Image: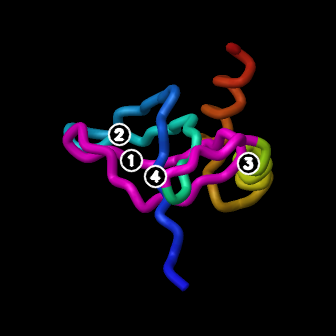
Amino acid sequence: MSKPTVKYTRHDRISHNVDAAYDIVFDRCTPVVNGTPRDQEQLLMRYTKNGNTINNAPAFNEIDMMKSIVKLYQSDLISLEAKEILRKGIEES
């Protein structure tokens, strides 16, 4: 049995510039599996290099993505400085 071909139709994107070559991006997309669009949109976290999107990134629904960000925030994996940036960014919204 062959592996399904998955492509994405992008609807919206936010981007954060890291340096001259790289951006971290979140794309809201509809998966298209073997040429057939799916009903549920997904949120992809990818990156661009010199303006070109680097694919092969996993896709998740936005609820799972946010739950993982909350877990990351509650963990010791990121610095207090990074947590403060996230906290201030949420408060400003």
Q: Considering depth in this image, is 16 or 34 the residue closer to the camera? A: 34
> Where does the C terminus fall, quadrant-wise?
top right
Where in the figure is residue 26, as x and y percent of width and height? 52, 38
Magenta-highlighted residues = 35-62
Residue 9 versus residue 3 in the image, above or below: above
* Residue type pointed to by label 3: Tyr
Secondary element under disc 1, as helix, strand or loop, is strand
* Residue type pointed to by label 4: Lys
Compare marks 4 and 2 and give the one earlier in the sequence.
Answer: 4
Residue labelled with disc 4: 7
Q: Could you tell me how far apart the alpha carbons at marks 4 and 1 are, in whole angstroms?
A: 16 Å
Compare marks 2 and 3 and give the one earlier in the sequence.
Answer: 2
In this view, the mark in front (4 or 1): 4
Residue 92 versus residue 85 in the image, above or below: above
Q: Considering depth in this image, is 40 or 21 the residue closer to the camera? A: 40
Q: Considering depth in this image, is 18 or 40 the residue closer to the camera? A: 40
Q: Could you tell me how far apart the alpha carbons at marks 2 and 3 are, in whole angstroms?
A: 21 Å
Residue contact at pointers 1 and 3, CB within 8 angstroms: no
Residue at 74% of width from left, 19% of height from top?
Answer: 91
Q: Could you tell me how far apart the alpha carbons at marks 3 and 4 are, in whole angstroms?
A: 31 Å
Residue labelled with disc 1: 47
Residue 85 versus residue 44 in the image, above or below: above
Compare marks 1 and 2 and give the one earlier in the sequence.
Answer: 2
Q: Could you tell me how far apart the alpha carbons at marks 1 and 3 are, in whole angstroms?
A: 21 Å
Residue contact at pointers 1 and 2, CB within 8 angstroms: yes
Compare marks 4 and 1 and give the one earlier in the sequence.
Answer: 4
Residue labelled with disc 2: 23
Secondary element under disc 3, as helix, strand or loop, is helix
